[in-house]
Image: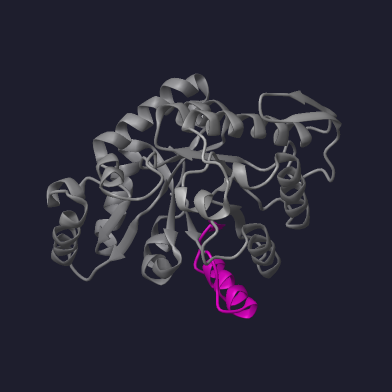
Amino acid sequence: MHPFRFGVQFSKSASGDDYREAVRRIEDLGYSTVFCPDHFDDQWAPTVALTVAAEATTELRVAALVYDVDYRHPVVLAKEIATLDLVSGGRVEFGIGAGWLLDDYDMAGIRFDKAGVRIDRMIEAIDIVQGLWSGEPVEFHGEHYVVQGLSGKPDPHQPGGPPLIIGGGGKRVLTAAARRADIVGLNASLHSGSVGPETALSALGERFLERRNWVEEAAGDRFPELELQMNTFMAAVTDSTSQADEMFEGMAPMFGLSPDQARTIPMVLAGTVNDVCDQLHHHRELYGASYWVIHEGEVDAMAPIVAKMSGI
């Protein structure tokens, strides 16, 4: 099993100085990575934010979770990520996805193709990006992209490019992730284009076990090399186990679940420090997830768990 490490999904600050101070604190508390999402709502542009984070720190890794393939051409993305990897001394992870948030597409006037089309486009984009990081000229003629004799420069710091992150909740995208990625994110289903009751039902423990099995089946011999990631919906550290029980009882009806069902959702970490540590051990044993991503408001509460669990 891979050792535990932890990242923080961090979308914006009030100012550049506030952001720099926050990412330095994230690094000092022992988190591995700072992530930035990629949406059109009130958040910072991911590549700019991650560049500032890399410059403000010395060891913290940086990544988008994840770049939407429909928002920028893979040739442009390859150059941006290679440059960031070069200037950061190899502290980049490369997250890319097929896109899911319907509101983004509607507001920006971007066509929201069927999931299969978006996944095909993502796979083509990955081939182009990694080809441009190979040091050889790229000739690519696909259904969605054409690249003719282009050599990718600059070369990324990490040979062959940064580790690739692909996440998903459906079999097709997780199959692609299992065969191509270095880090595979096990997610709830976002097929509907928004977060609602369908998403909650897809987040039950039995569904995550199914996803883990899809990844193992598709990965074959390379499965032990894969690092499995979980992006939490909530991480709450309480003074007592009973307080966590009350949280599950209050949260469950909002998503049409029973409290017992809610307790099986691995994307929710809740309880005392020891409770959450036990949950993490259980989830790694059952689902293989060792790379956990929390949100910016949970950084301090989760710090004792990060200190206790990182690297073991």
Q: Position of residue 103 (x, y in %)?
A: 46, 53
Q: Which residue is rendered at x = 59% and y = 71% of the image? A: 24
Front residue of 132 and 124 = 124
The answer to whether residue 194 is left or right of residue 200 is right
Answer whether residue 258 is visible to the viewer in this image.
Answer: yes
165 displayed left or right of 284: right
Q: Is residue 38 visible to us here?
A: no
| Residue 82 position (above or below residue 22) | above
| Quadrant for the N terminus in the image | top left
Please name whichever residue, 148 or 103, is drawn nearer the observer in this view of the structure.
103
Is 36 drawn above or below residue 198 in the view shown?
A: below
In this picture, is 301 found above or below 179? below
Q: How many marks?
A: 0
Where residue 228 appears, as percent x and y from the top left, is 45, 39
Can you say whether 148 is above or below 63 in the image?
above
Q: Indicate the position of residue 139 as horizontal and vertical percent values.
A: 81, 25
Give the quadrant of residue 73.
top right
Q: Nearer the viewer, residue 97 or 283?
A: 97
Give, as a single range, the part of the protein colored magenta. 11-37
Q: Is residue 94 magenta?
A: no
Q: Say whether residue 272 is left or right of residue 83.
A: left
